[in-house]
Amino acid sequence: MSDDTRSRILAAAGAIFADCGFEAATVREICRAAKANLASVNYHFGDKETLYLETIKLAHTLKTQQTPLPPWPPNTAPEEKLRVFVRTMLQRMLGQHDLCWTSRLMTREMLQPTLASKPLVEEFIRPQFDMLLSILDEMLPPATALHRRQKIAFSIIGQCLHYRISGEFVAILIPEDERRAGFSIDDLEEHIVNFSLAALTELARDPAHSWKYTPHGKA
Amino acid sequence: MSDDTRSRILAAAGAIFADCGFEAATVREICRAAKANLASVNYHFGDKETLYLETIKLAHTLKTQQTPLPPWPPNTAPEEKLRVFVRTMLQRMLGQHDLCWTSRLMTREMLQPTLASKPLVEEFIRPQFDMLLSILDEMLPPATALHRRQKIAFSIIGQCLHYRISGEFVAILIPEDERRAGFSIDDLEEHIVNFSLAALTELARDPAHSWKYTPHGKA
Amino acid sequence: MSDDTRSRILAAAGAIFADCGFEAATVREICRAAKANLASVNYHFGDKETLYLETIKLAHTLKTQQTPLPPWPPNTAPEEKLRVFVRTMLQRMLGQHDLCWTSRLMTREMLQPTLASKPLVEEFIRPQFDMLLSILDEMLPPATALHRRQKIAFSIIGQCLHYRISGEFVAILIPEDERRAGFSIDDLEEHIVNFSLAALTELARDPAHSWKYTPHGKA
Amino acid sequence: MSDDTRSRILAAAGAIFADCGFEAATVREICRAAKANLASVNYHFGDKETLYLETIKLAHTLKTQQTPLPPWPPNTAPEEKLRVFVRTMLQRMLGQHDLCWTSRLMTREMLQPTLASKPLVEEFIRPQFDMLLSILDEMLPPATALHRRQKIAFSIIGQCLHYRISGEFVAILIPEDERRAGFSIDDLEEHIVNFSLAALTELARDPAHSWKYTPHGKA
DNA sequence: AATGAATGAGCCTTCATTCAT
DNA sequence: GATGAATGAAGGCTCATTCAT
């Protein structure tokens, strides 16, 4: 394969950019990890920044291939869809497989957006966000305002993302034995789905709920 | 007077580390921003890393001074406490004030923990986490398992944190006019508190709720 | 066909070496200009330096083909020969034709001689220099010392060369409109020939002239 | 002296830029020659190009200090002035002293002008050029056209410059023993002054001279 | 005959750091 | 206490060149 070196560099760059960030990562380190010549990056990608952008693109592609949301069997209950959605998200973010660098890379991208952010969101994030919105649509009272659905979606996403972002802090807060007992990916999936379904149930039962409480700053 | 230079450096470093991260930030830039000599950093702090740690410490101190945990008036309802807790968290993370760099710095610290992480968690994060736990305690059925309360706490924290972390992505996903209409700090506060209270209400009403659904991976 | 690539490279190299010099010119740039593969230079010429030497050779060849020393019609007056000589020299150096890179290249070679200098001088410069000497011979008193004729020859050559070397400085010293008015190639030819003939006339009239003035450093 | 290193770099850079040109000269080599650290150039000058510009400025300054044209005693004959002018020019260009790099540098600048060229001409070259013009003014018929005086000036300058530019070629054309016999700086001075004075004499005697010969290209 | 891929040396620059004053 | 000068290490990048095909 003529692109053997190229892909080796790309893979090595993915992991290293994810670990160190764009600035701290060095081309030398990447080439060493890829067992490639120092000048290879320039030959194949032009410069470090282009390599970074290609890495983001690859992360995007791999993620979509890797854990695609399975096509729901017809008449799948929305609760089941939500469960699968959350599970997929947690798997993508916390699953310990070869490609876990893709998540770390995207988390960095969130914190310090580059030119790659916008296409990344449009092509990869938005479809999934829209799917979550449509799942919620099946469970919420008809004609729930869009922004309300969006915030609910973010609440679900935020619960998952938290374990990716604050993983280290969680590890410090919760002693290791307790963590093993109640914080496996399955445990988190169970909790997040339950918590969110409970909220949705209650909100559906008492649509006024969302109004009964008025924040300090308003009214 | 000598203190003056030192604190000017510290303040400048805070903002710059928060914006660029430890690696990308340069001592030159910090000194220029602080209108101090290039050698000042080494003179006052020894090296760049020590300056960084001091900056984290300062962020910590400022944060605690800035919004000290208010001693609740007696008989404050837990719902009210939760509301204040969420509001405070959002304000700290999204509010535009002089010290907003402290949040940005801590977010970075989460993603790429350094030596400073552990004391930061112990002295600053854990007390707040414990307070949230105790608030939840007042609302949950007696003897709810600790790990369950912890995950609920993380669900609430995660919802808030999401807007700090994924702020840029949210900005791309939601057009600006819609964002202005329904995503102000007040809006987010209202939503997160309502969503969480709804979940807690339903979970309290039907403690079995948390069991009625079994994730795929188990059972 | 194979010859095609080789000569395309050679032509491109000529112009680029002339413009940028040996060091500043890059093989990449030459190959791009010649629409040839990056490795072509090494394939056809071995290395960059050999290509340079070949370019010098080509310049040499082209120059001799281009304005071969015309066999004077019998009984041509030496003044006329001088005129043609000067005109040819100016045309070669300042004329805007496809091959003007040859002059620029040779000027560079003068300033920073390489291995190519000696053969260049022997095969191309010396014949012309000798011809100028023989022209002067016809006009000077018999038995004028060789070194004297040589210095006169250099005086004539130097006057022409000046406009090639210091062209940019002349352009700064003399405003453009004045330059257009009195510094065309024809103007320069007229002046240089007149100036030199005047000197030769006076020196012929008063051979002692060259002795009547004694420089400070001597005597 | 705090600027000791700075001046050492500047001096070393002068010689090396003069020898190799801007591209071929390396910062490493300059620093090695100046016994300075590799980073010194950046500290004192910012970058290589700025160092180059400073070097040109220095060359300019040194040249003016080094061999100033002596203030003529009153009633100095213009022929004497011309002699001193030519001698000074030759000395500056060929004299083998510590500062001969300044000439080589300026020759390079002529051939491949940079941003530094224009100020160099205006501040250093033009005053000398004007002085030569005024010397010629004293010797030429009144109301000789400006462009004619300018071309005569260039004829004199060109004769001198030739030995600086084509020195290597002269060395190949003229065997060493002959060169020693008739091409010392004093010899050249004698020749150039005699040749030019002869031309001026004849042109003054027969002002029409400049018209009696019509170049081929015209009329 | 010709080329795309790869290489190693070297470039300029920038960095955090130190040191003499 | 504070700083201008200087330093060594390392960075990204470009270069001419080579090699397998």
Image (cartoon, coloured by chain):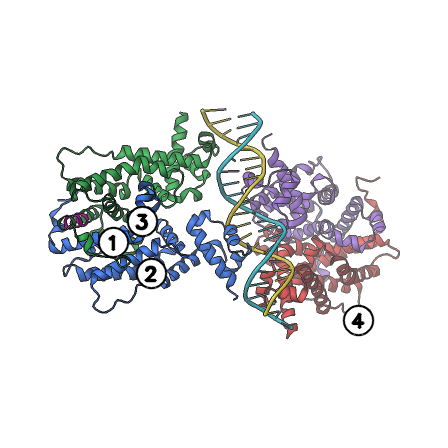
Chain colours: A blue, B green, C red, D purple, E cyan, F yellow
Instruction: List the residue tagged with mark 3.
Output: A163
- The verdict on residue B198 being magenta is yes
Residue drawn at (82%, 40%) of the image = C218
Q: Helix, strand or loop at disc 1? A: helix
Q: Closer to us: mark 2 or mark 3?
A: 3
Amino acid type indicated by mark 1: Glu
Residue D74 visible in rendering: yes
C81 relative to C163 in the view: left or right: right
- Are marks 2 and 3 in one subunit? yes
Which is in the foreground here, disc 3 or disc 1? 1
Which residue is nearer to you in this view: D166 or C182?
Answer: D166
| Rendered location of residue B168, percent (x, y) | 32, 51
Q: Quadrant of residue B26?
A: top left
Say whether marks 4 and 3 touch (CB < 8 Å).
Answer: no
Residue bounds of the magenta highlight: B194-202
Q: Secondary structure at mark 2?
A: helix
- Which is closer to the viewer, label 4 or label 1? 1
CA separation, marks 2 and 3? 20 Å
Residue type highlighted by circle 3: Tyr
Q: Nearer the viewer, mark 4 or mark 2?
A: 2
The residue that appears at 36% across and 38% down in the rendered structure is B118
Name the quadrant containing residue C64: bottom right
